Amino acid sequence: MGKLIIIGAGGVGNVVAKKCAREKAVFSEILLASRTKSKCDAIAQEIGSSHVTTAQVDADSVDELVKLFRSFEPDMVINVALPYQDLTIMDACLATGTHYLDTANYEPIDEAKFEYKWQWDYQNKFKDAGLMALLGCGFDPGVTGIYTAYALKHHFDEIHYLDIVDCNAGDHGKAFATNFNPEINIREITQKGKYWKDGSWHEIAPLSIHQPIEYPNIGPKESYLLYHEELESLVKNIPKLKRARFWMTFGEAYIRHLEVLQNVGMTSIKPIMYEGKEIVPLQFLKAVLPEPSELGENYSGETSIGCQIKGIKDDKETTYYVWNNCLHQDAWSDVRGQGVSYTTGVPAMLGAKMMMTGQWKQAGVFNVEEMDPDPFMKEIGGYGLPWNEKVNGPLAFADYD
Ligand code: NDP
């Protein structure tokens, strides 16, 4: 049992706060803090419990964070603000003796580039302080890494091929909207694609490799090869991988809008002068797009995210597919959120529970696949994200060599 700070009150923060608030035996007191306090207050009001309080904080400022942490004295923080704040929040954890968990790796605001290096560099500092930092505990990254660790523990001696397949077959009724923070989402999708093969990274033009993939209960959906952050840690932590790729579905309308926005310069992160003031086109675009937290009420359809794996067990070729399907409307009924926020926020809550109860507890900086997957896999279904598995069934890909 311990005290928890949640930073960020957007789509994911709403889910994390509500799910954690129901676990009173684990999180004795919760402080929800974000840049805009009124958003925290609205969530806390819906929770309606005196053990959840709110605060305003600018998480870009280590001093502000340290002041807040010193006044609340948390045992751990769940960071569901933006990737830009990861390092300042980790610094505040070190200054105040607080454990750390996030769902997205650090990204500098002025460069569309994410990698774990910046956070892995904190390894000795966290280890020496006896603190734990758990990186990327959403769905992808997050559950996809835990699925892979579970597969390796129970179904394979060696994993050779890993394809993470992520489908959102939902309809929110808007012409164009992103399911998580628009700025981060568009930066991720417009960068070059990349996958791991035979010991090195292979780069491709953005969205240039795609194919239909069959998703359970959904059917075939055009899926695009992207670079996604969990590939970096999985390649490091899963031995003998020959190839690792990540696929995500996009509808035609989404791709068309994105193409136009890119062509007219609206996705650029280079500042421009507008009426005597410097603005960043992508930040302006974010301001006019719907917020992820607004999409839930009329969202229909479902997500399907999983890992398709091929490798060796007892000297025989084995295949394994493990996945979750999540209905947007179930997310709405549970926490008044949408499916993408839900599939991120529920694993963050459960990861924090694993840390708070000592089931995952080590000093240093870790990715989720380094943890024992069993206690997490045992509980995640009960919190709304049940998983399915198929051993030695057909996989979506024919190109294994
Ligand atoms: P939102 O944009 O809905 O929410 C972000 C929240 O962070 C907002 O409340 C925002 O405040 C707050 N925030 C931003 N900057 C600061 C700051 N300087 N100080 C304090 N608070 C700040 O995004 P989402 O909820 O959709 O995403 C949250 C995180 O989850 C992102 O990092 C995203 O990449 C990650 N994610 C991870 C996934 C996974 O599966 N691993 C999937 C989806 C998302 P304000 O309201 O004032 O703007």
Image (tube, grey):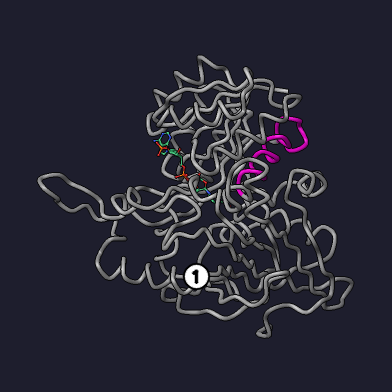
Q: Position of residue 301 (x, y in %)?
A: 62, 61
Mark 1 lies within 8 Å of ligand 1 (Cβ measured): no
Q: In screen coordinates, is 339 left or right of 110?
A: right
Q: Is residue 237 magenta?
A: no
Please name the amino acid that badge 1 sits on: Lys
Residue farthest toward the right in the current orientation of the protein? 314
Q: Position of residue 400 (x, y in %)?
A: 68, 83
Q: What residue is rendered at 73% in x and 62% in y?
A: 323
Q: Quadrant of the N terminus?
A: top right
Q: Nearer the viewer, residue 129 or 161?
A: 161
57 vs 159: above or below: above
Q: Main secondary structure of the magenta part?
A: helix
Q: What residue is rendered at 77% in x and 73% in y?
A: 311
Q: Position of residue 347 (x, y in %)?
A: 67, 45
Q: What residue is rendered at 28% in x and 59% in y?
A: 268
Quarter where residue 20 is shown: top right
The residue pinned by badge 1 equals 194
Q: Is residue 357 magenta?
A: yes
Q: Quadrant of the C terminus?
A: bottom right
Q: In screen coordinates, is 53 left or right of 325?
A: left
Q: What residue is rendered at 53% in x and 79% in y?
A: 210
Residue span colored magenta: 344-361
Q: Nearer the viewer, residue 188 or 128?
A: 188
Residue farthest toward the left in the current orientation of the protein? 276
Q: Nearer the viewer, residue 179 or 139?
A: 179
